[in-house]
Amino acid sequence: MNIPLESLKATTLTNIEVFLKKHMLIEATLLRAMDRTVSMRVLTSLGVKRVFKIQELPPEASLSRLVYVITPTKQAVQTIINHTEVDRKAQIKRCRLVAFVPKQTAAVKTLLESRGVLGDDLQIGDLSFGWIPIDVDLISLNLPEVYTNYFLHGDTSWPYHFGQMLGHVLETVLHADQAPTDISLHAFGSAAQVSAAGLSSAICQIRTSRLANSESIVDSDDQDSLSATSYHQPLFILFSRNLDYVTTFMVPTTFEALIHEIIGIDNGVVELPNVQKGDMVPTKLNLSSSNISCFKDVRNAHISTVHKWLQAQRSQLEDSRTGLGFSLAALDRSLPNPGEGPRVPSVTSLTNLSSQLKPILSVRKDLTSLFICLEEVMRKMANEERVEDLLGAQMEILQSGSGGALAMPVAPPPSPSSSTASTGSASSSQQEAYEPMPSEASTGTCADDPTCQPVRLALEWLSTRFGDRLAEAVRLLCLLSITHDGLGEELYNRVIRHIQHAVGFSIYPVLVALHRLRLLYPRLPRGAPLASTQSHVEKAEAVPSSRSTLRLVLAPTNADKLASATERLIKRRKSTYNRLHRQLQLSMRSQASLSVDKPAVSPSYVFGGQHVPVVVRLAESLWAEGLAGAANTGRPVLNGSELLRRDQLSRALTLLHVDERVAKTLGRVSLVPTVTGTSEGGWKTLSHGQTVVVAFVGGCTYAEVAALRFAAARRCWRLLIATSQILSTKSLIHQVGQAAAL
């Protein structure tokens, strides 16, 4: 049950038609997005003769009309300025149009004006590629600026633009007669709140255009009430990236997610390595279920089951080839033999054979492409990534950060006898449905111990590989810092020294940016001022009495007692991840103990049962809350540990540093004037066929996509995932480094 996306592409073509003329010079980072949006045939019909990649020097002098398609960055604008100055010295006159993707900013316009190039011969404009369809249920804006500019620099214009672009998604999801305000909108996080404001402005524009274009103007209140009774409300969830960094820095186990982590997927396209001419496969492959039909069956499967699946598909392909061989033999026998001359088949028989051969060749090409991807992933995982060590370190980090609550695989119990199996089956299945979490315990000391395995592995990568394993080392250290509310001060200083020694002092802006994003930072001592991002519970626990602090300071002879007291406080500390893990049931014992060849029972299968993305818990629980209604009449039908109650969701959102008022209303954003007594009004969802749109402000990972697809399959949703970009751990670290260097 997919949502049609043709209207989104039609909007993009309209935007491109406005600006593109003559010769186009496009930035290298935008080539893939352009390829996924329009073809060269379409560009030719719009007046584009040729497309060039932007180089350091301007093109030949015969090209008098140029269109530059660039991102609104200082480096790209500086290239345009250099081209203008070179042409000015050579006395070459051109007409230039600079189209900023997706829009211009005040900074780039000021830079062009200050250099004196903005004028009659150079004009600027906005050009949005719109939503790029990565798959039938996944669309992206390809805007990494949403993450870096907002979370690093506090620029709200990009999340606001993301919300405005969601207005096109809203028009696609809603019925033609349905009011744009007839949705259930929930925004989690500060960036999501900004995007919700942008979506609200887009909704106002949609309503205005509908009223202007309609022949008979209907009162808006009557129209809203009519639509509410005719159609169900789509569930819109806006999720801010900074609310769940654990998912971003973990190693996934699904096929598509590992392809993105190890090889790299650029807007749905992967470049196949080691492609031979005899393979008959393209070097660039569009990884989507619409392009490769069989990829849908294996994209979200565990990586260890892909080879077995490919072998089964190969056996089916061999059977088809055998059947085709029998058809050729039968055709040869049925042909008449005119004397000693060759047997000539008829046109009809050749057409039939061609219709049988084309599907076989197509399947062979698809299977060969997937096999090349699998081969490259397995080779790098074994030889370069050292994924076994990485997974072991990841498990130890989560076990320490959760205070021992992490679901670990256990041996299956002995099978009961036939007499007791029938009587105890109901009770055992009911116990497995709840999976109670262990009692609360303090967070482990892995973030303070330099001898623990994750820290030793990270320092080894930094010291023995000449800094070429920086991303893998930073990945482990960031995950350790996130799950433990920062590293110990001594360990943090030691890690920083190792990173600077391996890379050099040029890495200092990146370390500052990671500290600002709360990804890699030291844990504050008990007496230090607390950051504003900490919760009220942490502040209350962290502030000691002034009398006890003064007594410790004035007694220098009690150094040993102070050290032991500090050690006891560390052992009693509970991190945010520790509380959140228990509150949201982030790991599932039933999934962790399940073998990989068995069907998954929980979205946590993407991480081996040891973690489920936070957005999946929120989406499923909000859907169940809508089924229950305001009176919770339908809640007993949906019992289970993975469906959280309203009070559990509110407490979990408070732990995520969400505003108390937003947490109380579960992030509900009102799109119409509220009536007294209905500020916390419930919303209605469907048990089957519910439209759910999950929008990631800042980017999402393929692991989250796989988990949401699993949830949509078992809840019978019509799912659409919209994101500002597709993230991986390496791409996130790379973006932070680029933004910090500016």
Image (tube, grey):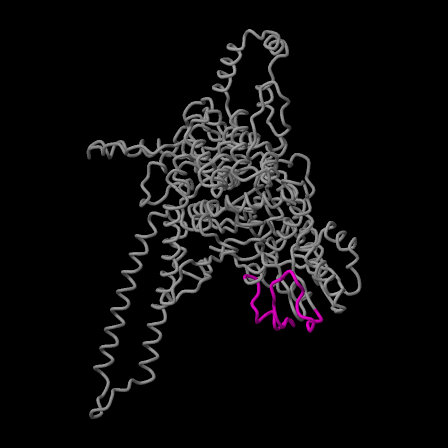
Query: Residue 64, how many percent across, how many down?
Result: 71, 71
What residue occupies the far bottom of the structure in this picture? 339
Query: Residue 229, how many percent across, how many down?
Result: 58, 49
Q: Is residue 485 visible?
A: no
Q: Where is 329 relative to 588, above or below? A: below
Query: Residue 25, how many percent across, how many down?
Result: 64, 64
Residue 120 figure quarter: bottom right
Q: Where is 317 relative to 495, above or below? A: below
Residue 668 figure quarter: top right
**In the shown orientation, is residue 289 left or right of residue 417?**
right
Q: Where is 32 relative to 565, above or below? A: below
**In the shown orientation, is residue 215 left or right of residue 454?**
right
Q: Residue at x 58, y 24 (%)?
A: 524
**In the shown orientation, is residue 562 left or right of residue 128?**
left
Magenta region: which residues?
36-65
Query: Residue 169, how many percent across, how many down?
Result: 59, 54
Is residue 438 a member of the stretch shown in magenta?
no
Q: Is residue 40 visible?
A: yes
Decide which of 39, 211 is in the foreground and name it: 39
Q: Where is 432 relative to 741, above or below? A: above
Decide which of 591, 737 is in the foreground and name it: 737
**In the shown orientation, is residue 469 left or right of residue 656?**
left
Is residue 60 a member of the stretch shown in magenta?
yes
Q: How many marks?
A: 0
Q: Quadrant of the C terminus?
A: top right
